[in-house]
Image: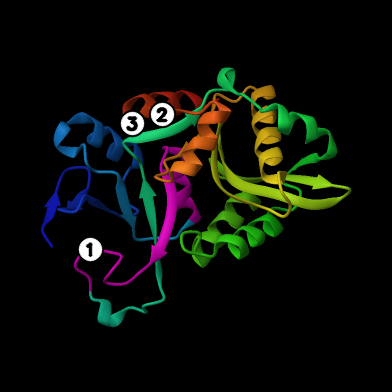
Amino acid sequence: MNLITDDAFVYNSDGDILVTKNNDPDKIIDKILSDEKYDTLERGVGLSFSPRFLGEFMFSGFYITSDALNKNTISFDMNFSSMDDLAFFPLLNIWKTQTVLFFENLHISRSTSRIIKNYELRINYDFENVLDNITRTHGDLWITPPLKEILITLNQKNYKSKAISFEVYKNGELKAGEIGIKTGKIYTSYSGFYRESSAGSVQLAMMLQYLKDNNYDFCNFGTDSSKSNNEYKKKLGATYIDRLDFVNLWREGRVK
């Protein structure tokens, strides 16, 4: 694999940036934005599951996922014979196009508005239970076991970016929830689950209304190639913005 060394990072011909604890996440983004030759770079491969390391990248606007470490998922030349095939690595994503919702554009459907009164919104009431439900529902394909532990740590301790949960209850029972990352006055949505029809829509609507009422700048949905996921976000009022606009808005909102 052909490695390209730059003053800010090392990357390969597939467009993956090799990221260590010595890399400054803001400098990586500035370098990507500085020249068209870096335009295709969207993903960093991290070499640490440290909460401080990943928290710094979250603070800079990277969307953190993870994957299993094997020859099919990582294209840097490494000595896989000495690695456990069940090991994992973090992926640090800064996509060219981001899906965001500015709250002046928030639209909650009439059908959802009619049933919201049947539910109660709680924040960070039972974070680990919500996270367990998410991985039971969707598996651990990208919220892998070590990333799950990082999210728990970022929920329990004080880092620049904090993992939080939004939960909806009906008659005292948890019906839907999601986890995400709070950075200043920006919320980044990660993943969620629901236990009854429409509860997921209610949770999302109540969460977005809470963010609006508490003067958040915007909700970041990351990026998603799934047409169905993008359609429901667009119906709520979400829109697409390019990476440069996203970074500028992010750096304003993260320090509020």
Mark closer to the chain start, 2 or 1: 1
The residue positioned 71% from the left and 27% from the top of the image is: 110
- Which residue is farthest front? 111
Q: Which residues are magenta?
A: 51-78
Asked whether the beta carbons under mark 1 and mark 3 sit within 8 Å of each other, the answer is: no
Amino acid carrying mark 1 in the image:
Ser
**Mark 1 vs mark 3, CA separation in Å:** 24 Å
Q: Which mark is residue 240?
A: 2
* As drawn, 37 above or below 55: above
The residue singled out by tag 3 in the image is 243
* Residue 199, quarter of the rendered image: top right
- In percent of width and height, residue 68 lies at 39, 68
- In percent of width and height, residue 205 lies at 67, 33
- In percent of width and height, residue 93 lies at 37, 46
- Which residue is farthest top? 104
Q: Which mark is residue 75?
A: 1
Q: Secondary structure at mark 3?
A: helix
Mark closer to the chain start, 1 or 3: 1
- In percent of width and height, residue 61 lies at 42, 37
